[in-house]
Image (cartoon, rainbow, N blue to C red):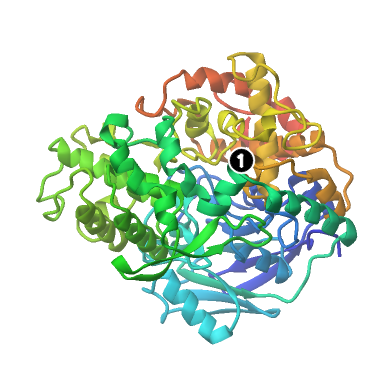
Amino acid sequence: MPNGYLGKILWINLSNDSFEEEELKDEVYRQYLGGYGLAAKLLYQNMPANIGALSSDSLFGFFPGLLTGTVAPFSGRFMVAGKSPLTGTWGDSNCGGYFGPEIKKCGYDAILIKGMSNSPKYISIIDGEKQILDASEFWGLDVVQTEEKLTEMYGKVQVASIGQSGEKLSLISGIVNDKARIAGRSGLGAVMGSKKLKAIVLRGNQSVNISDKKELLEHTKLYNEGIRNATGGAIEAYKSMGTTFGNTISFQIGDTPCKNWGGSRDDFPDEKLNKLAGTEILKFKQKSYGCFSCPVQCGAILKVPEVGLEETHRPEYETCASFGHLLLNDDLMTIFTANDLCNRAGLDTISAGATIAFAIECFENGILGLDDTDGIELTWGNSKAILEILKKIINREGIGDLLADGSKIASEKIGKGSEVYAIHALGQELGMHSAKYYKSMGASFAFDPTPGRHTSATLDMLAMGPIIKPDGLFEGIALPRKFKRAGEERSEAEKLVAGLWQSFNSLGLCEFSAFFQQYPLKKLIKAIVGWDISMEEIIKIGLRIQTLRQAFTLREGVDIIKNNISDRAVSIDYLEDYKGYCEKMGWNPDNGYPLKETLEELNLNFVINDLY
């Protein structure tokens, strides 16, 4: 068996209840690592172009990172990937918790699902025994109820499931593990629901071979000691408040949008803003919670008796922003409740909050009336109305059925000029970070193969971390000196960040680690996998992954270069920014197509016939 990875993936066909194991060559891992790098390779070559994302022929899967399942710090992440039914592009969503490592413990580097069942099913892989079983008793349950029932049946297991939103094919639904860790973006919960797959339950007994355990433990111990002994700064903030430490400061610096991206500081003054502060949320914390191999533990379990929540996960910054600032809602209890409802239903909180913001603005401008909203007064900051409309979205009832697929589709159905209030990228609501503050995010929102994502490779956001300094984040890496100015060095920096970020994701690393201290990446890869690998090769692998993700989106007929973002969310000519990036990437700046010579250089010759 190789080191770090298993060399084997599992295909599950729900049309005929079959399992098929496939061995992969070592070179596949050296070229694509794991996570969505491996996903891009497998899905591109196995899924026909231009098929419906919710059709029987559609594929999707679960892909732990190359380092996932080891003690390497922050390596517990996995990707869900497939064609997005929301945007029609390449779709992926990153998630943490303990489900990703369990895939490795079951003996696989990926689990891929194809076909479609005629009735609700769940998949169990328990100590090597694989079954596809009837899930009728679980259909209609939320993800917490589903996980608890499966745990009662099987003992200690890891579960990934969909809630009511995925069952009802909401295009803004996701897939949940650890009761509240959600792969929420790209609408992949709807893909799982379309296949009538309620859950996957895993328990494995295999371990990942390590090339040099002593070296791995030494590097891990040294890194974790730095995290443990850190005082002040980002590390301490994440330990204490998680991402909610940004609830106030991000808004104050102009990063957090408000009032459906059309508001200002005056719309959400400090007396409202301070009610959502991370320190206020901290008052309800019962214990810390973190992902596998995480030395920070930025999550938390809360108890909020005021709204009947005996145990619930702390809402992330994105959730607080989408159900708080974006809606001019300063009621923390509403945010706790909305977060719990979305987690249980498997609903993306970013898209859900943003779609409600769209509906409020439509109501405010007379496009929607009380007859359209089932009598709900959709006004800014109306916490009661926010929860009422959210429950309807989850259940696809009344106005909720109209909004359950996001603001773009809702605006197309409503008409009457409502499209100006739908702030999205090809149907996916934007992450809660402003491209007027992080200026490179305009191009990321518009043109990344998974548009609308704040977690894509965005230069100006990553430059907030140690990568700005020579050897700051990775040994031998530094941003070009003039990366802040428009021009060649900025474009070169965007290419560098794109390459690093794709590999970072595909290794299974948490993106927050990019904001802490130098990460011993090459040393850990050497200790775990046994590869002598340079940062130059790591970057090239990332460029290969990004180019293949781009090719997938283009092959689906998406004219990505023509995607426009609302002026509310951007302030510079992000198209020109993107064209400079394309030139450095070896892509045609007029349409985003990778050049033939670029595909050849990246060993992506199999793409050439599709694009040319």
Q: Residue at x 66, y 68 (%)?
A: 102
Q: Residue at x 88, y 53 (%)?
A: 530
Q: Quadrant of residue 357?
A: top left
Q: Quadrant of the N terminus?
A: bottom right
Report which residue position mark 1 lands on: 549
Q: Quadrant of residue 111?
A: bottom right
Determine the secondary structure under disc 1. Answer: helix
Q: Is residue 228 left or right of residue 221?
A: left
Residue 428: x and y in percent read 42, 42
Q: Nearer the viewer, residue 368 or 77?
A: 77
Q: Is residue 189 above or below residue 143?
A: above
Q: Quadrant of the C terminus?
A: top right
Q: Residue at x 38, y 58 (%)?
A: 339
Whether residue 332 is visible here, answered yes or no, is yes
Residue 552: x and y in percent read 59, 41
Q: Nearer the viewer, residue 385 or 8?
A: 385
Disc 1 residue type (three-letter) = Arg
Q: Is residue 337 above or below residue 144?
A: above
Q: Residue at x 16, y 51 (%)?
A: 373
Residue 195: x and y in percent read 47, 65
Q: Is residue 469 left or right of residue 13?
A: right
Whether residue 37 is visible here, answered yes or no, is no
Q: Is residue 406 above or below residue 19?
A: above
Residue 170: x and y in percent read 37, 56
- Numbered label tally: 1
Q: Is residue 99 left or right of residue 209?
A: left
Q: Is residue 359 above or below residue 423?
A: below
Identity of the residue furthest to the bottom in this view: 153
Q: Residues within 10 Å of mark 1 (few under 14, many from 20)?
A: many
Q: Is residue 531 left or right of residue 34?
A: right
